[in-house]
Image (cartoon, rainbow, N blue to C red):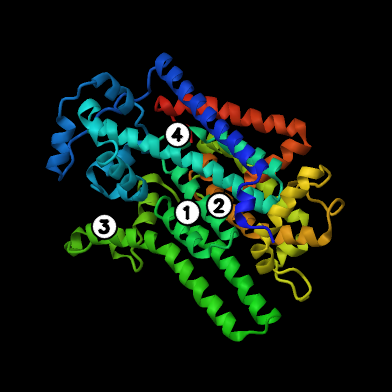
Amino acid sequence: MPTRSSTINDPSRISHTGILLRTAIASRIVLLTLTVIWRSIISPYDTSASINPSCLSSTTTTAAANATVLFPRIADAIENGVVWDSVYFVRIAQCGYEYEQTYAFLPLLPFCISLLSRTVLQPLVPLVGHRAVLALSGYILSNISFFFAALFLYRLSVIILKDPEASLRASILFCFNPASIFYSSIYSESLYALLSIGGLYFLMSGANNLAALWFAFSGCARSNGVLNAGYIGFQTMHQAYDALFLQKNPFLVFRVLISGILRCLFIFVPFVAFQAYGYFNLCDGHHLEKLRPWCKAKIPLLYNFIQSHYWGVGFLKYFQLKQLPNFLLASPILSIALCSIIHYVKLHPKVFFSLGFQVDPKTTSFLETQTSTVNREDQALRRRKHSKQEVGLTSLSTDNVSVDKLERFSIIIIPFVLHLGFMVATAFFVMHVQVSTRFLSSSPPIYWFASYVLASHKGWGYLIWSYCAVYILIGSLLFSNFYPFT
């Protein structure tokens, strides 16, 4: 049986990794160049980016912020890029959570920014100032996270698709995704993508505890990270089903359910703990008449209140005629997401609508599909060296592959499709719909489907690349100059 090391050291894998790294670096250089060009020829809509009021409670931070720097022009150039949500992340890293609305931004990215600025980049503070070093830390973290997210997407894709070429196409598309500007800015998109995609890779590789740990951290980067518990839940249901109906082992069923429930709870812990932190800071110990409305709720969930009260997020609240341009702005990514869901459901509707639960004991189970994936991956890679006739799973149809192979792929793709479907519905009906472009940008099935389209429908493939190019151009222009984008 092939070893994991033989899979990782496969020449085609190494070659693709090099191509992917060069592509990722090139995509960031393109974005940086575009940002510099747009900033130099267009005046920002809002010139208040460099304004940095003193922290409310920290005297040491205030002193550092007011200190004279040796290179003020460089400091200004760095700080001028701190726009939109980047202002919140840098401010939290510098001063902590000062206001109620800042609790909408989860703590992992600000914590990492603060840690990096106080350690590796600390010597730069006298040169460009504390806030510029914080901003520089954010840029470094986002771009490094992006590189590793792209690598993990490739590795995950090889496991799921069993086609290195299709996996490489999907990963290259991720490098030039339409929300690219956010992956090189001080936003949580890159860090969340790294943690969620990395967690999926570990889950599909059989490292369940490590996957739960990465998913938990993803929930500390973005609130939707808690949805990754659904992958653990889906796996647990299938393992319990296999233990009960195939192995006839009630004790194993109990053990599987307990371990799965504990992993899911562990994923929720960071987000719940942060909500408790907000409650004790803003509600506990205050007089009843001074309490904010959410403090008096039966379940005092700060995050939901902030999204609704400060940003007007809620079910159908965005369905207004004046928001039509924003729906149009989000329509390409929503269309691609819906097409990918339909595509994968149509591959084997019976398996999908049964959630992969099969009464026939001869049918391959989800547990067998997952645990044997990595071993079959190496054999498939070796076969492709000698034959180009094998068809990648991104183009599966009942005409060119066996029913067993089709069912196996359909079962393993189910949780990805369900997760994407829930996020699409949330983005369309609940959120500010224009945020869909970056909200859905870390979902692997979108890139797997787009990779299939590039290979099989050149006309639509050109349209996808054009969409990415246009949004990169528009995004770098609008976002860098403090104009609304997504």
| Mark 2 neighbour class, 10 Å CA radius: few under 14, some 14 to 19, many 20 or more | many
- If you read the primary sequence from the N terminus, does the residue marked by circle 2 or circle 1 appear first? 1
- If you read the primary sequence from the N terminus, does the residue marked by circle 1 or circle 3 appear first? 1
Residue at point 54%, 76% (across, down)? 257
Most distant residue in the top direction:
41
Q: In the picture shown, does residue 441 fall above or below 315?
A: above
Q: Which residue is the site of mark 1?
A: 224
Left or right position of 312 against 2: left
Q: Which residue is the site of mark 4?
A: 184
Real-space CA distance between mark 1 and mark 3, rounded to the nearest whole angstrom: 25 Å
Q: Quick one: SS at disc 2?
A: helix
Left or right position of 315 against 362: left
Left or right position of 342 against 103: right
Mark 2 in CB contact with mark 3 (< 8 angstroms): no
Amino acid under label 3?
Arg
Q: Nearer the viewer, mark 1 or mark 3?
A: 1
Q: Nearer the viewer, mark 4 or mark 3?
A: 4
